[in-house]
Image: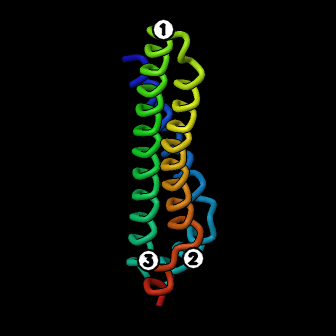
């Protein structure tokens, strides 16, 4: 239960960090400028992008934390049962954790693209 709460805390931290980064981005200035000239759809578009990036990254961090905790738990149990196979188990665990972490990094890249280099922003700011 403690690992689950740590995962939620980590996910919330990442989500709030994304929102903070989005507030300082260039698109925030463009959306505010478009909103002041009557482009309310640009403001809604940017708000949806920020919310989806934050939610997606929070869910990816939560899933990654839970997956890594489960993988480490099972590896430690395996090493406790067969100490002579610890090298093989540890190698497989490290490879598995790197794959789990790469999925979280992919979610971060997608969130940063949505926030800072949104390819759809040109269609909204017409």
Front one among 85 and 111 = 85
Q: In this rendering, is residue 70 above or below 108?
A: above
Horizontal side, residue 9 vs residue 94: left or right: left
Q: Earlier in the sequence, mark 3 or mark 1?
A: 3
Q: Can you tell which mark lies on residue 69? A: none
Q: In this rendering, is residue 68 above or below 58?
A: above
For mark 2, what is the residue? 30
Residue 38's image quarter? bottom left
Inter-mark Cα distance, 3 to 1: 56 Å
Residue at the image position 55 percent from the left and 25 percent from the top: 88
For mark 1, what is the residue? 80
Give x and y (percent) for residue 101.
53, 43
State the count of labels.
3
Residue at the image position 46 percent from the left and 25 percent from the top: 6
Q: Are marks 3 and 2 in contact (CB under 8 Å)?
A: yes
**Helix, strand or loop for disc 3:** helix
Front one among 10 and 84 = 84
For mark 3, what is the residue? 42
């Amino acid at each position: 239960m403690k690992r689950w709460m740590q995962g939620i805390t980590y996910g919330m931290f990442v989500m709030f960090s994304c929102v903070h980064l989005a507030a300082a981005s260039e698109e925030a200035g463009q959306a505010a400028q478009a909103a002041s000239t009557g482009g309310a759809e640009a403001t809604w578009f940017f708000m949806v992008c920020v919310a989806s990036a934050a939610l997606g990254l929070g869910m990816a961090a939560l899933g990654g934390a839970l997956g890594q905790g489960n993988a480490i738990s099972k590896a430690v149990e395996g090493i406790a049962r067969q100490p002579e196979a610890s090298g093989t188990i540890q190698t497989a665990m490290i490879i598995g954790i790197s794959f789990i972490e790469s999925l979280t990094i992919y979610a971060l890249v997608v969130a940063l693209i949505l926030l800072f280099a949104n390819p759809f922003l040109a269609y909204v700011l017409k």
